[in-house]
Amino acid sequence: MIILVAAVLNLYGLIGLYRYLTHQAGNPFALPGLVLGVAGIALVIPLATFFGVNGPVIADLYQQGIREVIEVVEATFTGALGLALLATSSLTGTVGAILFGIAIWRDGRSPRWTGVIFALSVALLAVPITFATELLGAMLLLISASVMWWNARQPPALGTQALANNRPAE
């Protein structure tokens, strides 16, 4: 259930990141990053919902000695369709994160390394090889999101504000 809640919150986070990157000027990488990022998350939500809702029931049945319940899980997620769903979700989410990373790099309001660790964090989360790599991805995502949040909260420089208002600096 934690993954399901995180996926839904991540959808809102991507929309907020898109707004942040396109607030003052267009960014050609932000929209494709948003579309692919949302698609990647939307494809993993059914999997998270299945395990969030059915996981406890499957575990109880397995503990009661009904070993056939594992065949249901294996048939659902180890077949060609299940693997295609997971691969497509990971690929689209990672490509979306890379595009967002490029958009952050080009935006200039946050340090360039923020875009690099954002893209790397989502790639580590999309393909969890070990718990340590998944934890590293989560920590990198927290760092990059915190830096972007901090920079979004800072008042703009005088020249930047004048340009945003279409007036010359005084």
Image (spheres, rainbow, N blue to C red):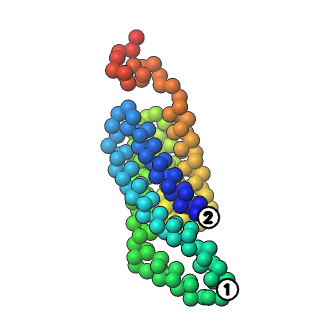
Instruction: Name the residue type under label 2.
Output: Phe
Q: Position of residue 96 (x, y in %)?
A: 40, 53
Q: Which mark is residue 19?
A: none
Disc 2 packing (10 Å; few <14; some 14–19; many ≥20): few
Image label count = 2
Instruction: Name the residue type under label 1.
Output: Gln
The alpha-carbon separation of the residues under discs 1 and 2 comes to 29 Å
Residue at 46%, 67% in the rendered image: 46
**Foreground residue among 152 and 128:** 152
Say what secondary structure mark 2 lies in. helix
Residue lying at the far right in this picture: please name it. Answer: 63
The residue identified by callout 1 is 64
Q: Position of residue 66 (x, y in %)?
A: 62, 88
Q: Which quadrant: the N terminus?
A: bottom right
Give residue 132's quadrant in the image.
bottom right
Residue at 58%, 48% in the rendered image: 142
Q: Is residue 91 visible?
A: yes
Say what secondary structure mark 1 lies in. loop
The residue identified by callout 2 is 131
Q: Is residue 160 left or right of residue 7?
A: left
Q: Position of residue 23 (x, y in %)?
A: 39, 35
Which of marks 2 and 1 precedes in the sequence?
Answer: 1
Q: Is residue 120 visible?
A: no
Q: Position of residue 68 (x, y in %)?
A: 56, 88
Height in image: 97 above or below 145? below
Height in image: 161 above or below 1? above
Residue at 56%, 50% in the rendered image: 140
Q: Which quadrant: the C terminus?
A: top left
